[in-house]
Amino acid sequence: MLKQWILIFLLLILAGSSTFGDTLLGRDKIAHFSTSMYMFCWNRGFGEDILEMNSSDSRCFGVGIALALGFGKEGSDLWVRKTEWSWGDIVWDVMGIGCGLVVINNNYFK
């Protein structure tokens, strides 16, 4: 059921990005992907090892921090740099977090 909700969420973001003329293949997309994946993995490890959270809570902590940073960056672009909000960047952030979840769930780091 969770996979279906994630797919619906990603499709809505994709539809929103195409509506506002945002491109999903811009130059900075790989930076969004890799940074979000790294921030998820790092914060998940921080939650589990330093804050002594259980595995499920540390994953939620990592996802929350990585999403907050992605949305914060877009907010900064909108209000500070006076550029447009990029739903395409958010899509790549979510894909990076998803890739981090796959890596963590398959125990590649253990």
Image (cartoon, grey):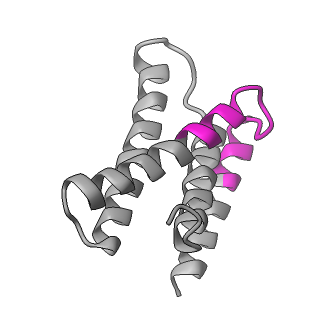
Residue 18 in percent (x, y) is at 74, 45
Q: Residue at x 48, y 30 (%)?
A: 74
Horizontally, residue 98 falls left or right of residue 43, namely right
Q: Residue at x 49, y 13 (%)?
A: 82
Horizontally, residue 24 falls left or right of residue 73, namely right
Horizontally, residue 87 falls left or right of residue 40, namely right
Would you say residue 28 sits in the magenta stretch?
yes
The answer to whether residue 74 is above or below residue 47 is: above
Q: Residue at x 53, y 61 (%)?
A: 109
Residue furthest left in the image: 51
Residue 64 can be seen in this image: no
Residue furthest top in the image: 81
Viewer-proximal residue, 38 or 29? 38
Look at the image and give the residue range highlighted in magenta: 14-35
Viewer-proximal residue, 42 or 70? 42
Residue 65 in percent (x, y) is at 35, 47
The answer to whether residue 60 is above or below residue 43 is: below
